[in-house]
């Protein structure tokens, strides 16, 4: 019901329905940049990370800061909640830290990467977490045991950023300055496809269903957001209204709306399918580095270069509150799955906030970089120091006195940009600065696998909601999709012309959203790898973050132009299943590729009967222009 945008004055929380600012999370003591924010699956907690090395957990409903995790010598590269909202996973240096957000205790540290953990994600219903690191590997982790393995023994090319699909089975990797995004399967390590981009990718984000990948890219003249079909590699939509660097991207849970944030103090809300800009939100007073939706899509959180977190009510599109507590830029935000806690991270500390109250509950100065909650909300992961990732009891992170460490991951010997739990919470994934992706077994705190494929550091990771795909984005402008069962790279997505900064899956796992340095947000078909949509709206500024709303209908992006934009990711014409603005053979191919798919929210299910079948083909055929 919310999405979050990190800005220069805090994390803005937006209502996902009205796009009105619901709250602004502040509490930062001095200048800081919020660079990562994430909602817990249940929408009760928002986590943020900033350049000061701290991670904050906020209560979305009370707007209070619950915990502040500080003391990190390196940045928290990724934050992700476990599927049950009880754990926050943080990618820090070469480790993944798991925190119990109920106790505020770090309960595990997943170690195994030999490079910085760039991105992490939980794989739903598997007890695993996947990670991507700068050691160019993808690793799978048993969340309970901490055991890990390198996925398929592959070596990713060096990358800038990486992001897993919501289900954790596909990794999208952005290769810095090489105008391409690679997609990898996290289970097998199979390379899926490459998306070529006109400029370097700035931000990557999968749609909630993992079918669309959005990314941003741009130059000083042109700032674009593109949406790609992850499966086909088709470019779905291009948005080009931003006049500044797009720093963040995020889909609303329904996958139909995309939010982008840029450096010119602007957040834009886009129709992800048509590319129509629904609304422009302003007031961040600095570039937006990260955006995140609460699990119920009612709140948008944003972190910015001016060390504040703003919370916005998505129904009223009104600002709620500002969280101020950082000494550096807030660049990490994550909600706990239950939506009660917001964690923010910066260069030197992690703060825990009440997502609803905005109250600052705790500050941890020895945590920094990437942060993440496990899907069940039981574990919180964060970087703790160089070469370590802490896993904490998420129930204890609100109080220093009761904080419990579940595990320390110390097998990672390089910095990382992102941490994410697999949807089932069993695996923590980290994106490393050397182009690798590491996956840790959360239960054993052991490194399972290191995947390589990116040519530059991996900057962002995202698991697809169905857990089948891990997407990684890197500095090499590529997004890679990984099969989480085989840990093999499934495909590489290319389209961004500058480094991919953020990736996010749609709720149905079919769309991946990405954001990049080229100022564009792109939607990708996860199955085909097609970049079917490009959103432009951050005025050519870097897109720092992308996030889908829980229903996959909205994508949020945060950019260097100081804005967080909301994009609608699904067409209002049912037969225009690929949302390209026309009904043609491409739509028929889109439906044909999904025949037999069961479940609600699939764009190919034209008659909305819960299954994609010949009736849907007939409906589209009858509407072909």
Image: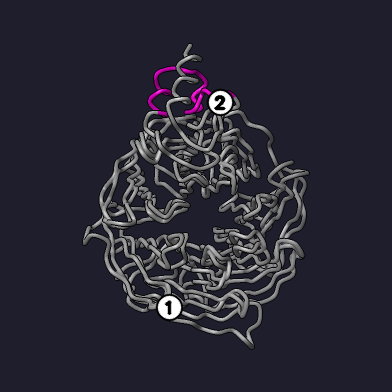
- In the figure, 511 relative to 413: above or below? above
Q: Which residue is mark 1?
A: 109
The residue that appears at 47% across and 28% down in the rendered structure is 578
In the image, 133 versus 17, the foreground residue is: 17
- Residue projecting furthest to the top: 625
Tell me residue 585's x, y (percent): 40, 18
Q: Is residue 138 left or right of residue 461?
A: left
The residue that appears at 34% across and 73% down in the rendered structure is 412
User: Secondary structure beneath disc 2?
Assistant: loop
Residue 541 in magenta stretch: no
Tell me residue 3's x, y (percent): 64, 50
The residue that appears at 42% across and 53% down in the rendered structure is 163
| Magenta range | 573-591
- Residue projecting furthest to the bottom: 401
The colour mode here is: one colour
Residue 579 in magenta stretch: yes
Q: Which residue is mark 2?
A: 574
């Amino acid at each position: 019901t919310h999405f979050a945008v990190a800005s220069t004055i805090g994390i803005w929380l937006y209502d996902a329905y009205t796009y009105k600012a619901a709250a602004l999370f502040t509490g930062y003591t001095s200048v800081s940049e919020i660079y990562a924010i994430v909602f817990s699956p249940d929408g009760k907690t928002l986590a943020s990370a900033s350049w000061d090395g701290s991670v904050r957990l906020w209560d979305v409903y009370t707007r209070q800061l619950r915990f502040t995790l500080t003391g990190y010598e390196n940045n928290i590269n990724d934050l992700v909640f476990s599927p049950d909202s009880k754990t926050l996973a943080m990618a820090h240096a070469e480790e993944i830290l798991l925190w119990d957000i109920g106790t505020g205790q770090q309960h595990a540290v997943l170690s195994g990467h030999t490079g910085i953990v760039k991105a992490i994600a939980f794989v739903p219903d598997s007890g695993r977490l996947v990670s991507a690191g700068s050691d160019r590997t993808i690793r799978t982790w048993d969340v309970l045991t901490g055991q890990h393995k390198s996925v398929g023994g592959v070596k990713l090319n060096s990358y800038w950023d990486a992001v897993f699909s919501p289900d954790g089975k596909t990794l999208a990797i952005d290769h810095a300055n090489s105008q391409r995004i690679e997609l990898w399967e996290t289970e097998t390590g199979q390379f899926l496809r490459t998306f070529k981009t006109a400029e370097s990718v700035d931000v990557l984000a999968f749609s909630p269903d993992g079918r669309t990948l959005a990314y941003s890219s741009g130059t000083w003249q042109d700032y674009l957001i593109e949406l790609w079909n992850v499966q086909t590699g088709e470019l779905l939509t291009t948005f080009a209204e931003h006049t500044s660097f797009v720093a963040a991207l995020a889909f609303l849970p329904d996958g139909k709306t995309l939010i982008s944030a840029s450096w010119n103090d602007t957040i834009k809300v886009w129709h992800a399918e048509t590319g129509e800009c629904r609304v422009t939100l302003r007031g961040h007073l600095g570039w937006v580095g990260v955006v995140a939706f609460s699990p119920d899509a009612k709140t948008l959180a944003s972190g910015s270069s001016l060390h504040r977190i703003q919370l916005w009510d998505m129904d009223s599109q009104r600002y709620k509150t500002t969280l101020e507590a950082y000494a550096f830029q807030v660049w990490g935000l994550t909600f706990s799955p239950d939506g009660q806690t917001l964690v923010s991270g910066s260069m030197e500390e992690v703060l825990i906030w009440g997502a609803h109250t905005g109250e600052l509950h705790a500050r941890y100065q020895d945590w920094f970089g990437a942060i993440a909650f496990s899907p069940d909300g039981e574990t919180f992961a964060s970087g703790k120091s160089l070469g370590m990732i802490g896993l904490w009891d998420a129930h204890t992170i609100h109080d220093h006195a009761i904080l419990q460490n579940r595990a320390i991951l110390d097998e990672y010997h390089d910095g990382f940009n992102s941490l994410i739990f697999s949807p089932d919470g069993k695996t923590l994934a980290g994106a490393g600065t050397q182009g690798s992706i590491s996956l840790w077994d959360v239960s054993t705190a052991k490194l399972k696998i290191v995947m390589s494929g990116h040519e530059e550091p991996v900057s962002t990771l995202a698991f697809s909601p169905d857990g089948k795909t891990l997407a990684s984005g890197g500095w090499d402008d590529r997004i890679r999709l990984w099969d989480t069962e085989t840990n093999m790279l499934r495909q590489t997505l290319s389209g961004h012309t500058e480094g991919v900064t953020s990736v996010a899956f749609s709720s149905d796992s079919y769309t991946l959203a990405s954001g990049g340095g080229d100022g564009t947000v792109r939607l990708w078909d996860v199955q085909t790898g097609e970049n079917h949509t490009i959103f432009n709206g951050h005025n050519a500024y870097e897109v720092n973050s992308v996030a889908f709303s829980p229903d996959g209908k909205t994508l949020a992006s945060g950019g260097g132009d100081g804005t967080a934009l909301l994009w609608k990711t699904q067409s209002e014409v049912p037969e225009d299943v690929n949302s390209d603005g026309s009904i043609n053979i491409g739509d028929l191919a889109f439906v044909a590729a999904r025949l037999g798919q069961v479940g609600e929210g699939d764009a190919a299910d034209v008659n909305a009967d819960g299954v994609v079948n010949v009736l849907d083909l007939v409906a589209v055929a009858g509407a072909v222009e």
